[in-house]
Image (spheres, rainbow, N blue to C red):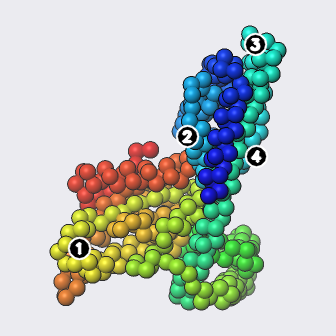
Amino acid sequence: MIKLKQSKEFSADWRRLSEETPAAVRQLVGEIVCRQAAALTDLFYRDMLRDEEARTFLDNDLVNQRLHAAMQRWLCELFSGAQQDPEAIYKHQCHIGEVHARIQLPIALVTRGARLLKHAIYNHLVESSLERGELVKATNFVAETIDLALDAMTDYYVIDMEKQTRTDEAYRMFALGQNMLAERERQRAAILEWAQQILLKLLADSDDAQLPDIKHSEFGMWLQHKAAIIFESAPELEQIRQRIEEVEKSLFPKLIESRRNRGGAGALMKEIEAGIAEIKFMLGGLFDRFIEVESGRDALTRLLNRRFLPAVLTREMGLARRSGVPFALLLLDLDRFKKINDTYGHAAGDLVLQQAADLVVSSVRAGDFVFRYGGEEMLIVLVEVDRNKALQVAETIRQRFASEPLRVGDGQTAQVTASVGIATYNGHPDYETMLKDADGALYEAKEAGRNRCVVSGR
């Protein structure tokens, strides 16, 4: 209802402005703006790229090409002299605001850019053949037109950002609803595995051994990508990070040096053991504070619900921009799944989906995310992987499906294959583009005969 009211208000203001501005003035403004659209667009993005935060995702060839063309179309459409439908214009501005919210473009940058556009267009109007009275009406027309468009964008930007905030919180509550007792033990075991790797490295290698850091261990990736969401703002989280940093950056170098000098290694090993024990203790406290909190999940497969996907992808894109390490999406579809339902019944189909979900989850790491994306589609978010690694993981999953018959009840099994579309993060700030790339690659895999993996060409 709020959006409908805003749409009506926008339409009324748009029509009023059109009626108050002579048609000849509107036509001349439209001609000037379209003629200068490329230069105005360059001015807008040149200013935006001065902002460090915006530069992280706008300084990308693919984005620049698309955004420059889109901005020029927007300017020409907004000031077109032809009769326009205000409701259609409003919807378009709302869509732009939605995209800005999705890529988390600061609204202050957009408003600053709008001011620059208005000033630049004013200068072009002053150099035109307009008389003083017409010039006043033309500048007012430009100012109100851009302000109306910006108001519509901002309204929807705020609405969408609020939705994202609620989704983020919902995802956090969902994550807390996992089997936290089992997860706690799993992460404790992952810490011990890391400690064991250190010991084996010290025993097997020379004094110049490179000790394995925790950042790239199972526990490290879980801590970076999932714990940060699940235990947001928990003081133990930062304490764990600080203790890990102390062990890796202070104690590890001292231990290596002491081994070279043949002295003091035993005492340092005890310090490292104490540090690991403290990390385990703090981890236990972290879980204890949140354990037994229940929330929703996919009732059949127990996978993440796709409504939490925006929260995860937005966060992973931010991490990838800051670290320079890409991630990937695998969109997996069970081939000819309808045949399972038709042959063995829907109960068998549900059983196959449950086993398929278990197979996928057991094929990825603790820091990765697995969603039920559709009926028989699953979406896997592989963190910290490049294109080659993502293809390798996808092939492993595909081969497991091809080699492991699934139960369909009554002691029977059926061979189920899977097709996988793969897309890797390329710097584009809109996660919908990445989802479309994965979907396009999956379509190619299906068209090529199924039971195969295809990597998006973009």
Give the secondary structure at mark 4: helix
Q: Which residue is mark 2?
A: 88
Q: How far across and down, in percent of the image, does residue 10 sit?
A: 66, 43
Q: Is residue 279 above or below residue 31?
A: below
| Mark toward the viewer: 3 or 1 | 3
Where is 323 relative to 149, above or below? below
In contact (CB < 8 Å): disc 3 and disc 4 = no
- Give the residue pinned by disc 3: 130
**Residue with the mark numbered 4:** 108
**Residue 346 in sight:** yes
- Quadrant where the image shows the C terminus: top left
| Quadrant position of residue 151 | top right
C-alpha separation, residue under disc 3 versus residue under disc 1: 72 Å
Label 2, label 3: how far apart the Cα atoms are: 30 Å
**Quarter of the rendering containing residue 180:** bottom right
- What type is the residue that disc 4 sits on? Ala
Q: Residue at x 45, y 76 (%)?
A: 298
Q: Secondary structure at mark 2?
A: helix
x then y, percent, for residue 47: 74, 35
Q: Secondary structure at mark 3?
A: loop
In front: mark 4 or mark 2?
2
